[in-house]
Image (tube, rainbow, N blue to C red):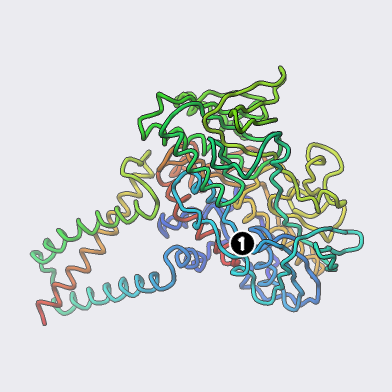
Amino acid sequence: MSKEPIVIDPSRSGRLDRRSFLKLGAAGAGTLLLLPDSASAATKVKTAARIVIAGAGAAGLTAAAQLAQRLEGAQITLVDARKAHFYQPGFTLVAGGIKPASYVVSSTRDYVPSGVELIEEAVAEIDPEGRKVVTATGKPVPYDYLIVATGLRLDYAAIEGMDVEQIGNNGLGSIYHSPEKAAATWQAMSKFADSGGVGVFLRPGTEMKCAGAPLKYTFLTDDHLRRRGNRGKAEIIYNANNKVLFSVPIVHEKVRMLFEERDIRMNYERTLAAIDLGKKIATFKTAEGPVELQYDFINVIPPMRAADAVRNSPLPWQEGNWAADGWIEVDKHTLRHKRFDNVFAVGDVAGVPKGKTAASVKWQVPVAVDHLVAQIEGRESQAHYGGYTSCPLITRLGQAMLIEFDYKDNLVPSFPGIIAPLEELWISWVMKTMALKPTYISMLHGRA
Amino acid sequence: MKELDPLVFWAVFQEMLGAPLLWLMLVVILAGTAAFFALLLKERRIDSRRLVRAEFVGVAGGCLALVLMAKVSSSGFTDAGGPADWFLIALVFGLGLAGTTILIYTLLGWRSRV
């Protein structure tokens, strides 16, 4: 077992490693967004600990793979009802008409490491005092260590009049719901790109997964309209929930400039409160009272909150901005729960300031796993997560900006001087469309 | 362990291309290179006429590499936005050109000797 501290913070280390990578060629470059930090070569730690991982999405499966590699004799159990696995970073590509729905769908079972048990039931209750998770059928699963990776819940019901069954019909789009609805959204958007009219885009007032996606989809719609010669017949309106388009100030300014250049109107401090699907009217909550927007196409992004099992448990923040939506109270640098030291949260459900993305998962999981393994061994882990996340922000078909940043709102480019983070580049698009999915899949297998 | 592990790249490329294609490519590259050097050793010179002919085919190989790249990355031909893009385009074209040239040169060379 290596005793060297594992520092997982690209702003502090790793630059030389990253540059040396260039020699290996640009095609696999997406790997850098999900840089490896495996300890697989080290000797395994022997333990009889029972480790439960609630949730078998990207974060849960990655954690399972890494734990299985580092521990011997541990009883590792994944709990998740969903049989399909979704490659969620691909949803915008499906809804943008670039990839088919099948591109993002695989099976959870394909990624469950050998020796790890998968209980195909939903997590109904988490009891950190009693050290157990209870499944939907009432089966208790006791644990010594718990990793919560339940992701988040899309709260469509919070938007009055919203009906997910109608996604794809009558100009209603919503890229996050599911692969099928992402494909249906593409049908609706493509129709809009043929006819023109008013396109309404927005983001919710809550924390959300991949905060770049609403912007990407606005850019993609703009480009499809232009390519079909219909941009002149269309008006595009983007509604931000707060005063910025992106939480990193320098990125906000860049996106604002691009939106102005592309004639995309911006409204600030507006959140979608209600929608009339028949009349195609979206009602936004603003400081000046409700504002109605007539649309021909809309991309609805619902408020996002932690799963009910988490919200009803003692795990969420008890006060502050994240308490209401149930994000788990963890230390942002170690992902360890602040009140229950045998509990960790990784992925979307973690109550940390930045990034509910697959890149965050890649950087969070090794840190949480190292702290957990160190606890089993009775040593202190130095692993540290600096908030690194990345967003290949698509700005048109064939180009993206490779934006990587951390908790401090610093840009932390993997290829400084070569791939400019605020430049619209084909190479960044190539990473998004070619290299990211293989890297992601390798991550699930614990190989990247 | 902070170094980039070559095995990770192997894993990613395997995921990208599929194991059979990746191994096939590796075999073609290794066998082609070996055959090329074997030919050089045997002839002890570069046949310039053969090389020029191989280079002509090589240009087509470079173009083919770019077309393949555009196809797998869902790109068009107007997407280059900055120097890094031109570098990548040059790299892909160059690899296609060099690879095809060496292969064709070697093939022609061994065929003329048979």
Residue that mark 1 sits on: A84
In the image, is B23 to the left or to the right of A113?
Answer: left
Q: Nearer the viewer, residue B10 or A197?
A: A197
Q: Position of residue A409 (x, y in %)?
A: 63, 37
Q: Residue furthest bottom?
A: B114
Q: Nearer the viewer, residue A299 or A425?
A: A299
Front residue (pair A18, B19): B19
- In the image, is residue A415 above or below residue A115? above
Q: Residue farthest to the right? A: A129
Describe residue A268's horizontal placement relative to residue A344 as left or right: left
Q: Is residue A197 above or below residue A184?
A: above
Q: Nearer the viewer, residue A114 or B108?
A: A114
Is residue A327 in sight in this rendering?
yes
| Image coords of residue A251 (percent x, y) | 56, 33
Q: Where, by quadrant of the figure, is residue A346 drawn? A: bottom right
Tell me which residue sits at (32%, 49%) in the image: B89
Residue B33: % across, % down: 27, 72
Quadrant of the rendering where the N terminus of chain A is positioned: bottom right
Q: Residue at x 78, y 42 (%)?
A: A325
Q: Please, what is the three-letter code of the amino acid marked with disc 1?
A: Ala
Q: Residue A412: in sight, yes or no? A: no
Residue at 52%, 39% (x, y): give it: A216
The residue drawn where x is 60% and y is 45% is A176
Query: Which chain letter matches label 1?
Result: A
Callout 1: 10 Å neighbours few (<14), some, many (20+)? some
Considering every residue shown, the one lying at the far front of the view is A278
* Residue A286 drawn at (x, y percent): 70, 22
Q: Is residue A124 shown above or below A351?
A: below
Work out which residue is located at the far top of the displayed protein and give it. A288
Q: Secondary structure at mark 1?
A: strand
Q: Is residue A254 above or below residue A73?
A: above
